[in-house]
Image (cartoon, rainbow, N blue to C red):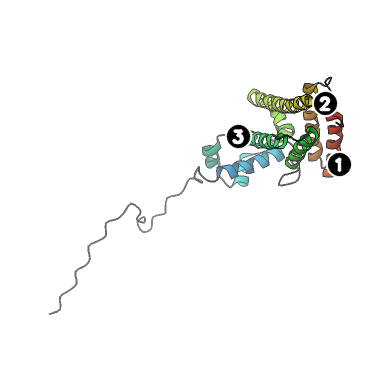
């Protein structure tokens, strides 16, 4: 007599078991917060630098970063928060390049040349052509109406002035500048040269012409010592 096989006991559903037949899988609410935030911030930065704050919409930012609005809010806050984070990222990157360029014991003219070259590399970069300086080209516009951003701009410009002044003061002590020179004023002129380079780069001035301005500025500020 053949014995009938018993039906196996049903398996206990695990926490990872599939949903019941016919049920739709749960929808994800955007991308997780860990979705490459540094890359997304860099993409937002490029967009803000190209268009400015007012002309950049949340839909534009969503398309550029690949993150929907809830994900953007979750990762960065509102548009103003994202703008400030983008500016901070730009400022930190520029500060690192400037610090590396003027470091060491090279002559002042050589260190100034390295600094200008490093910043021109930034100004001439951009997904849709030269973007110029984020601070000069877009943040100064928002500084008029936003006191927090205005304070950040003032700090950024003042920091650049001080970096040049410190470099020129050291050069003066080493005999590369005359004792009558004013390192503070010369530092402000050196920083102002960067600002005009940013505007000209954004306007499409070729690198060769910008390099000539750099060489002339160094001649005027640091002399031929």
Q: Mark 3 touching mark 1, by CB under 8 A? A: no
Along the viewing direction, whichever of 106 and 31 lies nearer the viewer: 106
Cα gap from disc 3 to disc 1, whole angstroms: 33 Å
| CA gap, disc 2 and disc 3 | 39 Å
Residue count near mark 3 (Cα–Cα under 10 Å), binned few <14, some 14–19, many ≥20: some
Q: Identify the mark at residue 177; answer none if there is no mark.
A: 2
* Residue at the disc numbered 1: 209
Q: Residue at x 84, y 23 (%)?
A: 178
Mark 3, secondary structure of its residue: helix
Which structural element holds mark 1?
A: helix
In percent of width and height, residue 194 lies at: 78, 33
- Would you identify the image quadrant in which residue 67 lies? top right
Residue 11 in the image: state x and y as whole percent: 27, 60
Question: Can residue 68 be seen from the camera position used here?
Answer: no
Horizontal and vertical percent position of residue 15:
33, 51
Q: Which of the two marks, 3 or 1, is nearer to us in this view? A: 1
Within 10 Å of the Cα at label 1, are there few (<14), some (14-19), or many (20+) other Cα atoms? few
Count neighbours of disc 2 (C-alpha within 10 A) and say few if under 14, some if 14 to 19, many if 20 or more: many
Which residue: 78% across, 32% down? Answer: 195
Q: Quadrant of residue 130?
A: top right
* Residue position marked by numbered label 3 in the rendering: 85
Instruction: Using the image, tell me which numbered label, if any, was put on residue 29.
Output: none
Q: Residue extending furthest front?
A: 174
Residue at left offset 67%, top offset 38%: 48
């Amino acid at each position: 007599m053949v014995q009938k096989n018993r039906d196996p006991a049903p398996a206990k559903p695990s926490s990872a078991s599939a949903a019941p037949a016919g049920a739709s899988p749960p929808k994800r609410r955007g991308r997780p917060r860990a979705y490459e935030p540094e890359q997304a911030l860099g993409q937002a930065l490029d967009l803000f630098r190209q268009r400015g704050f007012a002309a950049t919409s949340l839909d534009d930012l969503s398309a550029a970063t690949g993150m929907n609005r809830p994900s953007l809010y979750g990762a960065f806050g509102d548009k103003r928060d994202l703008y400030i984070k983008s500016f901070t990222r730009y400022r930190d990157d520029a500060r690192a390049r400037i610090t590396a360029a003027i470091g060491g014991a090279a002559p002042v003219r050589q260190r100034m040349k390295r600094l200008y070259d490093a910043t021109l590399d930034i100004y001439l970069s951009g997904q849709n052509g030269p973007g110029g300086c984020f601070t000069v080209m877009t943040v100064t516009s928002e500084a008029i109406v936003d006191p927090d951003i205005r304070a950040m701009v003032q700090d950024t410009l003042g920091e650049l002035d001080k970096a040049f002044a410190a470099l020129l003061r050291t050069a003066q002590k080493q005999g590369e500048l005359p004792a009558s020179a004013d390192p503070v004023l010369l530092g402000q002129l050196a920083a102002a040269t960067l600002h005009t380079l940013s505007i000209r780069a954004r306007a499409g001035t070729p690198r060769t012409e910008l390099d000539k301005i750099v060489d002339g500025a160094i001649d005027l500020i640091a002399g031929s010592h």
